[in-house]
Image (cartoon, rainbow, N blue to C red):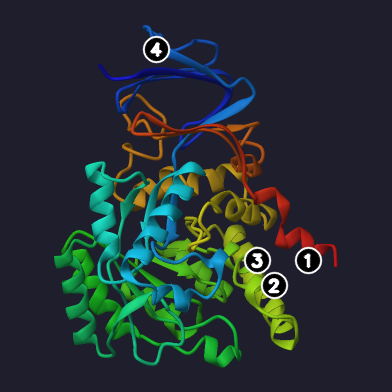
Amino acid sequence: MSAAFEIRARHLWDGKTGRTGLVSVGVEGDRVRSVGKDGAPAPAGGAEILDFDDATILPGLIDMHTHLGINHQTGDIRAQMKDPAVRHILAGVQSLRTDLESGVTTAKLNGDREFYDVQVRDAIREGSIPGPRLFVSGRGIKSSYCTGGVVATAIVDDAESVGRCADENLAAGADWIKLFSSGGIFGTLEAVLRPSYGFGQLSAAASKAHAAGKRMSSHCFGGEAADACIEAGVDVMDHGWLLTERQLEAMAKRGMWLCPTVGVLTHPEGVLGHLPEGPKRDEARRRIDAVCATAAAALRIGVPLLAGTDAMHGGLAYELETLQDLGGKPTALLMAVTSSAAEVLGLAGEIGVVREGAAADLVVVRGSALADVGCLADVLLVMRAGKIVKKGHTLLKARKFSWPRYRRGL
């Protein structure tokens, strides 16, 4: 007999709107059975009651940018990409478990080695290992002169070869296509904004993805590469760290999604934390300030928003709190990691929502996440497909450090 639960709290984010008052969500098997609002509890029917009082019930969170076999918090991701296969995969499985216990019940992987991401996705689907439901990109595609994209293992330059790599990824079972049209974020502005792919390569990949009913994302910081991404029909721009207001407005007009991933730069255990003190670190801080200014402009202009950690595993709460400090409204940020992400993944109404008949992917956090997304760091319950993954107090790292608050205090 399938398990049944009645989850009670004072606040509810249903993926689109928030409400405060007695709320009760009934779960049976792997589905949401009922949602009671405004003092009307869902019928229990012998269900186990989980009452969290002053807490928020939300759909399971969706991390739209992470990776399997790397973890920025442990440093030297180039070395991690060269780990022996078993170590690489086991580290990735552990990272995904960390993500799941932080409330991430769905994640999009943005490129990995040798189609390991496809294999791990399928193992999770079969129930062989625990983890979020995964959408995978197979091998990341980049040019031979791209200075970034450590995770990219398909190295080609011309449009025809890019299209062939896209076909190979799709044939291997990839859900998305991922290209790198910019390189690394540190260095001269000219070098950072130098495009590694242009319209020809980007449109070749986009057309392959779209013809297969899939979508495409591109690692891009700005400059000519960003204009090419917008023109070529790229669905999601990852990072967009140095976009101009003109480019942000063009994205907003087109309805192109932005996944800014600022936390991988700002967190003390992220990229900045692994740079030694000295002039290069000082220069990096100034570049990160510019990145934060761009993210703030994107929030102000209203570019369609997604959110991801870029392999800061367990750090989605920190990412959202950073965006909140940069001007993001809590409800817009909650939508970015629930219903908006589900829409982009093609699962609108199935995940990213709390409603009758939807998947029972649920998270409960202490306090009102409707007023402060920092509450997402205080996890009380994680449920994936109707099964309890985590129950109990888990205070994550979001509230320990905030780059915008830190910089304002200098």
Image mark for residue 407: 1
Q: Residues within 10 Å of mark 2 (few under 14, many from 20)?
A: some
Residue 381 position in % (x across, y down)? 51, 31
Structural distance between the alpha carbons of marks 4 and 3: 43 Å
Please, what secondary structure does the residue beneath circle 2 have?
helix
Mark 1 touches mark 2? (CB < 8 Å): yes
Q: Residues within 10 Å of mark 4 (few under 14, many from 20)?
A: some
Residue 308 position in % (x across, y down)? 49, 58
Say which quarter of the image contains residue 407: bottom right
Structural distance between the alpha carbons of marks 3 and 1: 10 Å
Q: Amino acid at mark 4?
A: Ala
Image mark for residue 266: 3
Residue labelled with disc 4? 47
- For the N terminus, which image quadrant? top left
Mark 1 or 2, nearer chain start: 2
Residue 75 position in % (x across, y down)? 55, 71
- 256 vs 96, nearest the viewer: 96
Say which quarter of the image contains residue 186: bottom right
Describe residue 16's horizontal placement relative to residue 399 as left or right: left
Mark 2 touches mark 3? (CB < 8 Å): no
Q: Residues within 10 Å of mark 1 (few under 14, many from 20)?
A: few
Image mark for residue 289: 2
Please, what secondary structure does the residue beneath circle 3 have?
helix
Residue sitting at 17 percent across and 73 percent down?
A: 168
